[in-house]
Image (cartoon, coloured by chain):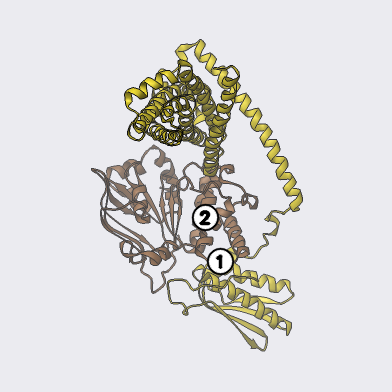
Chain colours: A brown, B yellow
Amino acid sequence: MSQIPPLPDEPEIAIRVRDVVVGFGQKLVLKGLDLDVRRGEVLGFVGGSGTGKSVLTRAILGLVPKRGGSIEVFGQNLDELRGARRRSLERRWGVLFQQGALFSGLTVLQNIQLPMREHLQISQSLMNELAMLKLELVGLKRDAADKFPSELSGGMIKRAALARALSLDPEILFLDEPTSGLDPIGAAEFDQLIATLQKTLGLTVYMVTHDLDSLYSICDRIAALADGKIVATGTIEEMLASDHPWLRAYFHGQRARQLALPQA
Amino acid sequence: MTSPQPKEPATGAPQQNEPRVSGESSPDGTRLLLTGLWTLERSGAMEAAAGDLERIGAKAAAHGGALLIDLAGVAGLDTAGAWLIDRARARLAQAGAVVEVRWAAERQAILLDQAHYRSFEASAPRPGSPLVNWLANIGETLVSAGRDIVAGVSFLGEIVASLLRALSHPSRLRPTSITYHVENFAFRALPIIALINFLVGCIVAQQGVFQLSRFGAAAFAVDLIGILVLRELAVLLTSIMVAGRTGSAITAELGSMKMREEIDALRVMGLDPMEVLVTPRLIALLISLPLLTFLAGLSALFGGLLVAWGYGGISPEIFLARLQNAIGLNTFLVGLIKAPFMALVIGVIACLEGFRVQGSAESLGRQVTASVVKAIFMVIVVDGMFAMFFAAIKY
């Protein structure tokens, strides 16, 4: 994958997570977790169901309070950012939620325009044009613009939600299981779309996924979560070579073997 | 091009890296130098600068010669910036100028290609004439009102059919579900309904004693309280509270079940949503509302007794004695007979509105509001009809 060289005044690491502890009640979900996401890479984040993948994502986004540790985005500690500085940082990331989280009372076009309307000082005509441009970038037809989310198919919802996540030209894109619920062809198209956008827009992509195809085809690095910690990070080859029991089960299971064989 | 006056963003150095355009004549045409950050971070200034680009370009093109848009000085570019630059290029070219974009870095070239200018005019909805739209709206409203009535009647029919089916097969009555709903609708609503009726009883007693004492008839306040509370107030206040509290809950519950395809899931499992969801709630309401009305009446009478004692000096013994003379069994029954009808009105409207929820959160809110407003309105209408009916039969 193409690595975009970082700008000289920006750190190499886009997201730096250190010793993060998150728990609910008595139960600790993340127990001192460390993770680095480099600028311009596609990081695939794997882990069994219920191990806290979404919790970490939500902790980075500030949706779940953490009990300890620090999270830095572009070298800025999130705990120390308040008010306008926090908002200006939030403009630099876009999030694709698992179910899309499109606003059901707004059309697709209005959904894409909502962040622009709130954050930018541009004319309505330019907003319309930019929203339509985003719509075409994610591969939706123009007639989808005036539809409501309830009239869209699952794949179209994902694409529309991706267009909304991209509406402010973010530098980091968070994807929560982007290909879940899509058919294999649609999932492959979506993977390709993310790879293309990542290359052209120079995005840093943080992707929670269960889709082995995505891991093989578009991820630069993979981080694996087990027992509340990152047990391994590295390329797909390093994952395949790992001895960790969960990783062995994950990457050498029945479904993984069929993918690994042609490449081996 | 119109653009709102750009405000400086709250963060970052305002003057540094502002997107700017400057024209520069050269022998083979005009160089349009772009500098600064052409990104959404400078959204307002960027749109203004794109306007400058078109204006300067058009002026230069009028003098003849080619236009070169020079990107070498651009510090940052995103899709919005690329779109604006390419839009200016396309519009200048359309006006007959020879335009070329030069010295774009590799990434900028990719962005310019991805965000190349295209017209989105066709996708804009065509606004019709206001008069036609207005007439169309009236027509639509009329037709949907007609459909409302048909849907309501057919729904009532379905409910009656499913109630009858339940009565003919008592084994399909779902006692657990009914008990659960009675607990929610009646038991948990009791404190608030008792309190409201207690307070209204107090107010009626105070006003009765105060107004009637001018005629030396303060003792008749007891008759007033007894008749008013038992015939009208207890059942009316209880029904309105239940419409607001339980009707809205039923609509929201059924509506969100419909949104999440849970009702379709019931149907494909061979279960009748009417039987599983609607009948237990309706039966629970039919049980709850008379119980609540009875207790509401007691609570209001108790409030009246306390105020008549403290404020009007009517001792509890006298109050009870007068009350027994003032009211008969029929006064009590008039209120109670109305309760199941109110329950039916509230339940049918709540379920009907719940099933009409569409896919959006907005429609859920709209349907819940409609459910409460329609239910309260119909409760008052039904109460008025009963008042006329009981007056006619002198009960």
Is B98 positioned to the left or the right of B369 in the image?
right
Q: Give amino acid for label 1.
A: Ala
Q: Secondary structure at mark 1?
A: helix
Q: Residue at x 45, y 59 (%)?
A: A1
Using the rendered view, name the quadrant where residue B180 is placed. Answer: top left
Q: Can I make out residue A79 in this image?
A: yes
Q: Can I make out residue B268 in this image?
A: no
Q: Position of residue A145 (x, y in %)?
A: 61, 52
Is A142 positioned to the left or the right of B267 in the image?
right
Q: Is residue B326 above or below residue B16?
A: above
Q: Give amino acid for label 2.
A: Arg
Q: Is residue A61 above or below residue B83?
A: above
Is A37 positioned to the left or the right of A200 in the image?
left
Total tally of numbered discs in the picture: 2
Q: Please give the chain letter of the residue carrying mark 1.
A: B
Is B381 positioned to the left or the right of B127 in the image?
left
Q: Position of residue A112 (x, y in %)?
A: 55, 56
Q: Which mark is residue A164?
A: 2
Q: Quadrant of the C terminus of chain B?
A: top right
Q: Are marks 1 and 2 in contact (CB under 8 Å)?
A: no
Q: Position of residue B107 (x, y in %)?
A: 52, 69
Q: Is residue B316 above or below residue A260?
A: above
Q: Quadrant of the N terminus of chain B?
A: bottom right
The foreground one among B119 and B373 is: B373
**How far apart are labels 1 and 2 at the CA level?**
14 Å
Give the residue pinned by disc 1: B80
